[in-house]
Amino acid sequence: MPDPIADSLKTRFGAGLRNVTEFRGETTLHVKPEALVEVCTFLRDDPAARYDFLSDVSAADVWPDEPRFQVNYHIYSMTRNTRLRLKVSVREDQAIPSVTGVWPAANWFERETYDLFGVKFTGHPDLRRILLPDDYLGHPLRRDAPLVVEEVEFSYNYDDVEARKPYAKE
């Protein structure tokens, strides 16, 4: 059964929503990037919705399809005990508005999404890397990121030069 708030969102934000899908009891709203903050503010403030908790912000790289990224917002209404997913499709060169003004917890989630996927959020108060070093090149969760192989230090290759000779690269 779809979330009853989805029908009111369709009438209120018709142009801002791409579509609404229902699968196995989960409702997903596909939101256009330019309507994201307005839709999120409505979902938080409307007495019938009251989605007052942002559980997660994540992304998926669907390359080679376009738009390349799907940013997913998982929100929860504590008073109604319902969950809702918002999906925003974003091109690689496109930035989407930050929802830190709606849910302050989005700060860390958006930084993580930026760090690992390279999705930029306009209006974010502190958009910088959070998990990787500042000098790290690229974004490791992109599908076209190169695989990096690093030799793990074991007892045979750590301190005994003679013991690691058979494994040395020449």
Image (spheres, rainbow, N blue to C red):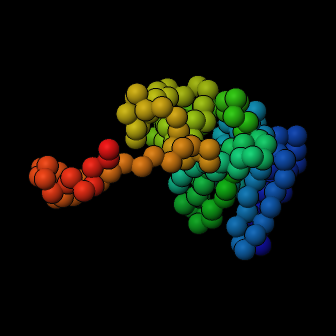
Query: Which x, y percent locates residue 3?
Result: 74, 64
Which is nearer the eye, 24 or 41?
24
Image quadrant in which the C terminus is located: top left
- Above or below — where is 127 with respect to 40? above
- Above or below — where is 101 with respect to 2? above
Q: Residue at x 88, y 48 (%)?
A: 11
Which is nearer the eye, 22 or 80?
22
State left or right for residue 58 relative to residue 13: left
Q: Residue at x 69, y 44 (%)?
A: 69
Query: Which x, y percent locates residue 44?
Result: 63, 46
Q: Is residue 26 visible?
A: yes
Which is nearer the eye, 40 or 95?
95
Residue 22, picture quadrant: bottom right
Q: Residue at x 54, y 52 (%)?
A: 56
Q: Residue at x 73, y 36 (%)?
A: 91
Which is nearer the eye, 55 or 120?
120
How many numbered marks, from 0 up? 0
Q: Is residue 105 visible?
A: no
Query: Which x, y percent locates residue 141?
Result: 55, 47
Image quadrant in which the N terminus is located: bottom right
State left or right for residue 169 relative to residue 50: left
